[in-house]
Image (cartoon, grey):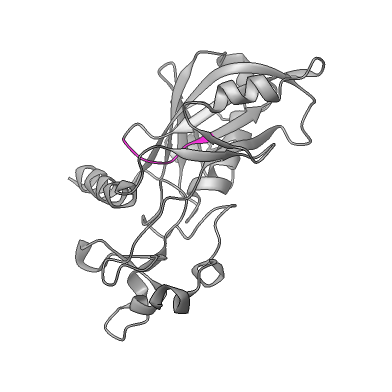
Amino acid sequence: MNVLKNILKILTINIVLMARQTAAPGTCFICEEPVTKRTFVTHLLKNHKEESGGTQFIIMVDTPYASPYWMALIASPDATLRELDNMLRDVWVECCGHLSAFTISGVEYLTSYDGDLDDDDGFSKSESMRIKIKRILEPGMAFKYEYDFGTTTLLRLKIVDSIIMDEPKKSIIVVGMNNKPEAVCSECGKPAVYHYGEWDDEQLLCKTCASDEEVDECYLLPICNSPRTGLCGFEGGRYDSPPDEQDWDEDEEED
């Protein structure tokens, strides 16, 4: 029942955020050109492939349900699943140090926030994330990632291709992502910056409406560019700005 309730909440949030989205527009972080999830890999191979360097994997990340969220990664074949887990946590999902797991070809690779689990933790059937990607994955292979086994965020990953590039300074880097979906306040129609989920009644609120004395701030969470937005205690990842720093002029909206 909790799983079904969680799925329904995720779908409700994404239906609201996708109401004005006709595609999945995004940006290439290498050249800052506009792209979409559908065109990004072609753009990357056409414009950023180099004649010499090392072979890197192109990993596309999105959700198994309809949502505007996607992300493209460049990963060294020598990178580990633990490094990939750290990247996903840092950019999209980390909130309370929950467990996470990859499932690849039917095998589960599990970890905690502080590191891999020991057999004494009751997860002896799961493999360690200290394994290199190239040992278990190759271009064309798809796999899944779960973060938090209570309020679960489920991601779909695929190594869509490989590319010749200079070795990045880090073993895994983000090279493209969807633009943050527009969100409108449920009360007044201004740009929304908060989720408000008291009594499971999901609303989106602007700064002004969120400051109303009838709003319990304990139920406010910032709207983030992540499929985990509005869930658990998630307040944003690497590329999210706090609501107080988001760039829009409230007075201008009133004119």
- 200 sits left or right of 74 in the view: left
Which residue of the protein is positioned furthest toward the bottom in this rendering? 213
Residue 68 on the magenta span: yes
| Residue extent of the magenta highlight | 66-71
Residue shown at the point (27%, 47%) measured from the top left:
15
Above-or-below relation of 173 to 59 = below
Extreme residue in the left direction = 1
The x, y position of residue 183, in whole percent, is: 37, 58
**Residue at the (20%, 67%) spot, across then down:** 199
Residue 121 location (% of width, % of height): 46, 40
- Image height of 187 relative to 87, above or below: below
Residue 60, x across and y down, in percent: 52, 28
* Residue 54 found in image quarter: top right
Task: Classify 194 as above or below 182.
Answer: below
Q: Nearer the viewer, residue 137 or 203?
A: 203
The question of residue 154 being in magenta is answered with: no
- Residue at horizontal 59 percent and vertical 40 percent from the top: 87
Residue lying furthest right: 52
